[in-house]
Image: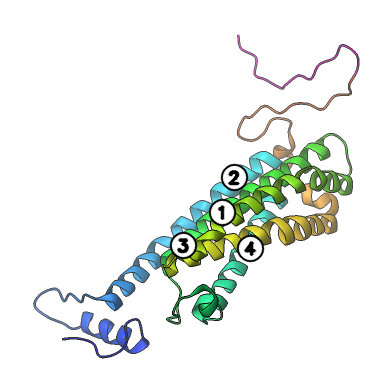
Amino acid sequence: MALTASPLSPAAQQTVEAVQSLPGPGQVTVIGQTASFLALQKSLKSHLPLVLGLIVLIALFMLVAMTRSLVLPLMAVVMNVFTIGAAFGVLVWAFQWGHLSHLLGFGTVGALQSTSLIIILAVVFGLSTDYGVFLLGRMKEEHDAGADPSEAIARGLEHTGGIVSTAASCLALAIGALVLSRLVFVKELGLGVAFAVILDATIVRGLLVPALMKLLGPASWWSPARLGRTRSPIGIPVLRKQPVVPGAVLTADLPVVK
């Protein structure tokens, strides 16, 4: 039996699901583009929550270990989700709705590649976290040195803004060239990641994160007393901030070896 409806259409998907649910003495196997799509969607729904949970938990753990704050890691994850959501929105507008079909030279099918979305999600989340580490790390250094929250934000943004902007521009140019590919899957990767990188390095890290930290003030560095110790929660020694005097050197809070 062959389907007469267009592949991936609602009618085709309903027909495949109806055939697969038919009772029979043996296993019913349906092949084709629609059947493969439904199998992929089922696999993603069953495995994606666990994968996303692990990614978020690992990112939170590492950011808490670095900043010794509970507020900043949560804010970083929320900003990552914002960047990913904006990138997905652009992909829907460009590819699913077909507004860039003539410019980029592709035929729209009214949907996005599921696998490309998963890859974009993982890549963008990692890059956004990486840029966040640059920014928050420098702000933390200034805060630990005695600067007030507003001054730490300004200095951190001043010292890392150029680095993050340059890195994002180079990456966006390199991966954005993938939109010239003949494969729609590759075009989606190029546009999605390039847009997300530029958005994260400008609007998110240059405007939203500093503005939110400014509004929160000292509360952005809040953490339980146990996380506020000199030693980080994963045992990484941290340099103590000491006044610079002639003949003095900075020492690390290192374990004593007997």
> Which mark identifies residue 118?
3
Assess disc 4: are there few (<14), some (14-19) or many (≥20) residues with their C-alpha within 10 Å of its C-alpha.
many
Residue 13 occupies quadrant: bottom left
* Number of numbered markers: 4
Neighbours of disc 2 within 10 Å: few (<14), some (14-19), many (20+): some
Is 132 magenta? The answer is no
Q: Disc 2 and disc 3: Cα gap in Å? A: 22 Å
Mark 3 residue element: helix
Residue 109, horizontal then vertical, whole percent: 42, 81
Tell me the tag on residue 10.
none
> Which of marks 2 and 1 precedes in the sequence?
2
Q: Residues within 10 Å of mark 3 (few under 14, many from 20)?
A: some
Marks 1 & 4, CB-CB < 8 Å contact = no
**Residue at numbered disc 1:** 174
Whether label 4 touches label 3, CB < 8 Å: no
**Residue at numbered disc 2:** 61
> Residues under labels 1 and 2: Cα distance?
31 Å
For label 2, the SS is helix
Q: Nearer the viewer, residue 112 or 188?
A: 188
Alpha carbon distance from label 3 to label 1: 20 Å
Q: Nearer the viewer, residue 228 or 34?
A: 34
Q: Please give left or right for residue 83 compared with residue 122 in the image.
A: right
Q: CA distance from mark 4 to mark 2?
A: 20 Å
Say which quarter of the image contains residue 229: top right
Q: Position of residue 158 (x, y in %)?
A: 82, 46
| Labelled disc at residue 83 | 4
Disc 2 marks a residue whose amino acid type is Phe
Q: Amino acid at mark 3?
A: Ile
The stretch in magenta equals 245-258
